[in-house]
Image (tube, helix red, strand yellow):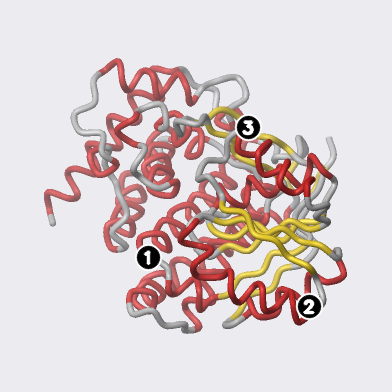
Amino acid sequence: MTYSFESPAAYVQGRDAIDEVGDRAEPLGETALLIGDEVVLGIVEGRVRDSFDAAGVEIAVEEFGGECSASEIDRVGEVASDIDAEVIVGAGGGKALDTAKAVREDLGMAMVSMPTIASTDAPTSSLSVIYSEGGEFEEYWFHESHPDLVLVDTEVIAGAPTRLFRSGIADAMATWFEGEAVHRAGGENFFGERPTNAAYRLCSLCYDLLGDHGRAALTAVENGVVTEAVEAVTEANILLGGLGFESGGIAAAHSIHNGLTQLEAAHDATHGERVNVGTTTQLVLEGRPDEFIGEVIDFSVALELPVTLAELGVADPSEEDLQRVAEAALAPEETIHNAFDVSAADVRDAMIVADELGRERLDRG
């Protein structure tokens, strides 16, 4: 068995970093395509155009359709081909960035990953999470290359909705629990190899930064300002979470997230919100001590993260609903198998207990 660690070619983070995107992308090609949804383009398009114009790089813009589906990837790919784009710039959240990664892979382009929210760890990775046009998880697409550049403007991040920043903390928090579970089990990372010690330590550092700075960072983002706490948590959410999940491996929390997408009632919850319920379920599945699970739930409640199914929109789920989630979480390709040998009944029962623990905590106030 070999050990591996992979990463983007470059990572840049800081206030007003967006104004540097043209200069930093100029070595990658002479023609670029920017994709983002309507809201994101309203925030970044002007500055991105100005930056590319100043760098002497042609840039076109295409509005992203909203779902990282096979059909949307094909559509954006046709646009990129029509203008002979050499660089694709994905701006926005994980689905826009994952679409850009897939187009880049299909066409052999360079790729700039430019998240405008710190809600997931997708920006640094070499994979795309593919959904149906209706928003149900379908599969992972694994790509040959990572982004050539990940560029994060923390002023843009701090100006985004606080809920999305909070969601990123939840996604990043799972990095440690899943990475630790994979490490303990001798499981594999996303490259089908053993995680390095470096990846394991990055997972741990990610969790430490969230614990040290999470509350202060949320307070800053609620006020739309950038502080050192915001910089630290943004790095944890995007860089450390991304490197950690991909090179360190993930386990049950994300599989349970994927299972929850089978329930339409959970579709309005964010990725990180669903993952957080997956995290507490994983801790129950592992048989972690009550006190430890309680501490994680307390931290989640302090950050206003969901700890119950009802908070995801799934009020009073039926036994059939929970069985569907559990069976989807145990699909053959799911990452839960990296660390656990469990049945659908095990997952279903752990969800019931985790949900009850969350409700008991909320009842205490």
Q: Secondary structure at mark 3?
A: helix
| Relative height, residue 22 to residue 108 (above, below) | below
Q: Secondary structure at mark 1?
A: loop
The structure residue drawn at horizontal position 42% and vertical position 32%, both measured from the top left corner, is: 261
Marks 3/2: CA distance?
A: 32 Å
Kind of residue at disc 1: Pro
Residue 168, x across and y down, in percent: 47, 58
| Relative height, residue 11 to residue 8 (above, below) | below
Kind of residue at disc 3: Ala
Q: Are marks 3 and 1 in contact (CB under 8 Å)?
A: no
Q: Quadrant of the C terminus?
A: bottom left
Instruction: Name the residue beneath numbered marker 3.
Output: 70
Marks 3/1: CA distance?
A: 28 Å
Instruction: Name the residue beneath numbered marker 2.
Output: 23
Residue 116, x across and y down, in percent: 53, 65
Question: Which of the two residues, 36 or 148, is positioned nearer the viewer here?
Answer: 36
Density class for disc 2 (Cα within 10 Å; few <14, some 14-19, many ≥20) is some
Marks 1/2: CA distance?
A: 28 Å
The structure residue drawn at horizontal position 47% and vertical position 22%, both measured from the top left corner, is: 328
Q: Which label was assigned to residue 161?
A: 1
Image quadrant assignment for residue 193: top right
Kind of residue at disc 2: Asp
